[in-house]
Image (cartoon, rainbow, N blue to C red):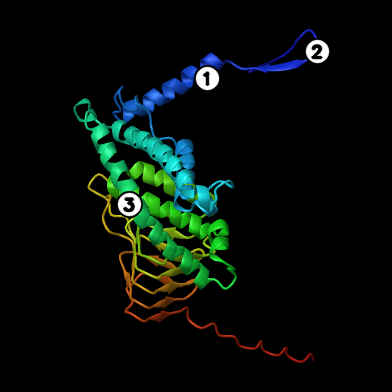
Amino acid sequence: MSVAEDDEGSVGIYWDTDAIVGQLRDAREAWRSARSRNAEYGSVGFPSRLALEKIIAALCGVLFPLRLGPSFVRRHNEDAYVAETLQTALSRLYGQIRLELGYSLSQEEAALVDQDAARIIRHFAAALPRLRVLLDTDVEAAYAGDPAARSVDEVLLCYPCVLAIIHHRLAHLLHGLGAPLIARIVSEIANSRTGIDIHPGASIGESFFIDHGTGVVIGETAVIGARVRLYQAVTLGARSFPADADGALKKGHARHPIVEDDVVIYAGATILGRVTIGRGSTIGGNVWLTESVPPLSDIRQADTRREPLAAPAPSA
């Protein structure tokens, strides 16, 4: 970098762009070479987080047009808005799915991209009505479970947990259909906006409610039943991370908790490993749990004992 002054006395700052570009290229090529990435890898592009943010926002409007759609939507033009927005959003999502499927395939497999992307988008679109019905149970659970909620409209418009759950249910659907990278991007969009981190692989039943929600973490293989309620800073995580003979972490094995129906888990609780929280149980705040508990358990921290301070000794 150098600093120079022009004829009018203005100071400009200059740097060697060509050298920086070359050094950045060298760094990229060294990384690719070390990981055996061939020249074709990534040549078709990658899914775009920015594009997916717009697509998911549009799909939120499709699912809840009067409350999450644009301000001009009314009952009389609701269907027209949904039809136009759905067509555009699905077309763009199809393009993003093609990018995910295509970036790591061999030339022999590339011919299957269009066929597989069409399959995914077709099943995804067909599932949206069922997804809306499932989301209605989540919204009702949030309204019923929070005395501060004045209406379901307030819940949909204001509650970060509802935004996170909508994103999760869309992401979980994509994950199961064969678009895990796009699903993970969708979940991380919600995480960045709400502080609620739900892996798209996690399975969550109906009427799910996260009160407040900041700091909640739900791992990839967690299984959550119906009518479960969590509070902020709850972790459903893994206890250990098995590795193979080369030291690489093993992928995909079940390592997160199973939470059965009608469980309540209060703020700050941490539940680790493939343990089962039995139906109807209550897990108290800040509990650290690494063992299964039977149905209807009430798990709390040990009682805090308070004893009066000893009286000071009289002065001599």
Q: Amino acid at mark 2?
A: Gly
Above or below, 47 relative to 202? above
Q: Is residue 54 visible?
A: yes
Name the spot of residue 206 as percent of width and height, x first: 38, 65
Q: Is residue 268 visible?
A: no
Name the spot of residue 52 as percent of width and height, x first: 44, 40
Relative to 250, 79 lies left or right: right
Relative to 188, 100 lies left or right: left
Residue sitting nearer the eye, 129 or 246:
129
Q: Residue at x 58, y 62 (%)?
A: 154
Q: Amino acid at mark 3?
A: Ala
Residue sitting nearer the eye, 167 or 21:
167
Q: Which residue is mark 2?
A: 9
> Which badge, 2 or 1, comes first in the chain's sequence?
2
Q: Residue at x 56, y 16 (%)?
A: 17
Q: Secondary structure at mark 3?
A: helix
Q: Which residue is mark 1?
A: 20
Q: Residue at x 32, y 73 (%)?
A: 292
Residue sitting nearer the eye, 223 or 20:
223
Q: Which residue is mark 3?
A: 127
Name the spot of residue 207 as percent of width and height, x first: 41, 67
